[in-house]
Image (cartoon, rainbow, N blue to C red):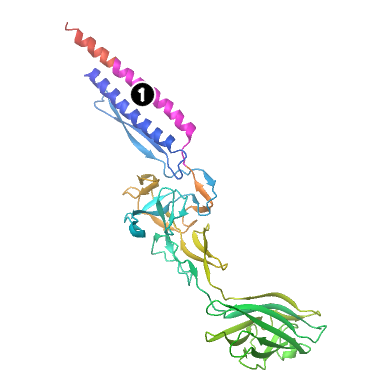
Amino acid sequence: MSLLGAMNTAISGLNAQSAAFSNISDNVANSQTVGFKEVDTAFIDYLSVSDATQNQAHAVVTIPQYQNNVQGTLTQTSDPLGMAISGQGFFPVSTATSTAGGQTTFATTPAYTRAGDFQLNAQGYLVNSAGNYLNGWPVNSQTGVVNTNSLAPIQVTQTIYNPVPTSTISLSANLPATPNSTTPVSSQVTVYDALGTAHTVNLNWTQNATNDWTVSINVPDDTIATTEGTADVQFGTTSGNGVAAGTVGALGTPTGNVTTTSFSAGGAANISFTANFGQGPQAITLNLGNFGASTGLTQYAGSTYTLNGINQNGVPPGSYSSITAAASGDISVNYSNGQSRVIAQVPVMTFASPDQLQSQNGQAYTTTINSGNPIANAAGTNGAGTLVVGSVEQSNVDIAQQFSKLIVAQEAYSANTKLITTSDQLMQATINMKQ
């Protein structure tokens, strides 16, 4: 019985070392696979009889030890959508079940991966090299609110940025306290109508007296009247209000379709007018800053007009230009008009026991009872790792370590074969005793 037991034990040793060889082979083969996680081998002793008087040959079996929680090296990539997780967590992904007719359908079982080499496919989805589709929280394009109650494959569908008509013009400038000419000084700004067509608004400033100016608003493309009207702007104590010298103290005497805001300490100093570019009345507010503040429009010492900045909130139409990822997880679509829109945010999924996840094809994993349920976190919060954009995580396999294990497994395998042949020889010798 001892010889048979020894042979059976050696055979179990061969099976165990074969399993170790298999894991080592898998690790070495995937040493360059993005997001791959090493599988180690644990050996477990199974007893037959072992007590104070006898110890019969045992058996050995193996179980895989997954190293899902061990991070690989992060390396830079030329792919602007490449992402790596520094720390704990996984990317949520979906697998496609069909792409027939240009329509993609997805499996209902969620999956998770560390392979972040994502690129845009022909249908506008973010897909990694293994064919897994990146999931994200949708973002309301109008409000910017992230819907954390929904998780779906990220797809670029908003290929056109609709025009936004101008409603506000903000002016930052200094009118000269002592102008060297009576010729009006002027500023120009381009505004947009409801169709995204560009138009010019001229602001002409004339000094009436010390600390007292009149602005004339001229819109050459207005289909009703090219001159919208005028308004007086008074600075400092000339306004009759207690404001600092050189700051806007009062707006008044509007003409045409121009209106002004009344004085309120620290309140907005606005001049409003209505233009018509053929699509109906378009209300536009000229923001001069705040009453009594040194931001926006001022009148300080000098003889020339100084324009510090003039901008407006209108946008011409734009077409899709590119897509970018941010360290916050925001996925943004960029347009030819210089605008961008956040369409989704990528969460980082964490688990109580990530080493207990079930391996799937393409460096993906699914949950098990032992892994625990996934917890979705914004990147860098609640223990979740941070996102490193423009990088990918390489395999966590250490080649030198694998070759060391290979040598040990090889020697152990050879030793077990020697035990089997020796056991066989002894059994033959025992059988030959009858002859």
The residue depicted at 73 percent of the width and 85 percent of the height is 205
Residue 95 locus on image (x, y percent): 36, 53
- Picture quarter with the N terminus: top left
Residue 108 locus on image (x, y percent): 31, 56
Q: Which residues are magenta?
A: 395-421
Q: Residue furthest top?
A: 435
Image position of 72 (left or right of 286): left
Observer-nearest of 316 and 423? 316
Q: Residue furthest right?
A: 180
Asked which quadrant contains residue 37, the reply is top left
Observer-nearest of 304 and 299? 304
Observer-nearest of 316 and 136? 316
Image position of 149 (left or right of 218): left
> What's the magenta bit mostly, secondary-structure-wise?
helix
- Picture quarter with the C terminus: top left
Q: Identity of the amino acid at label 1?
A: Tyr
Residue 211 locus on image (x, y percent): 76, 87
Is residue 94 at all visible to an observer of this figure? yes
Is residue 56 at all visible to an observer of this figure? no
- Above or below: residue 98 compared with residue 224: above
- Above or below: residue 391 compared with residue 331: above
Asked which quadrant contains residue 220, the reply is bottom right
Q: Residue furthest left?
A: 434
Which secondary structure lies at badge 1?
helix
- Above or below: residue 148 compared with residue 307: above
Image position of 39 (left or right of 341): left
The answer to whether residue 403 is magenta is yes
Observer-nearest of 128 and 359? 128
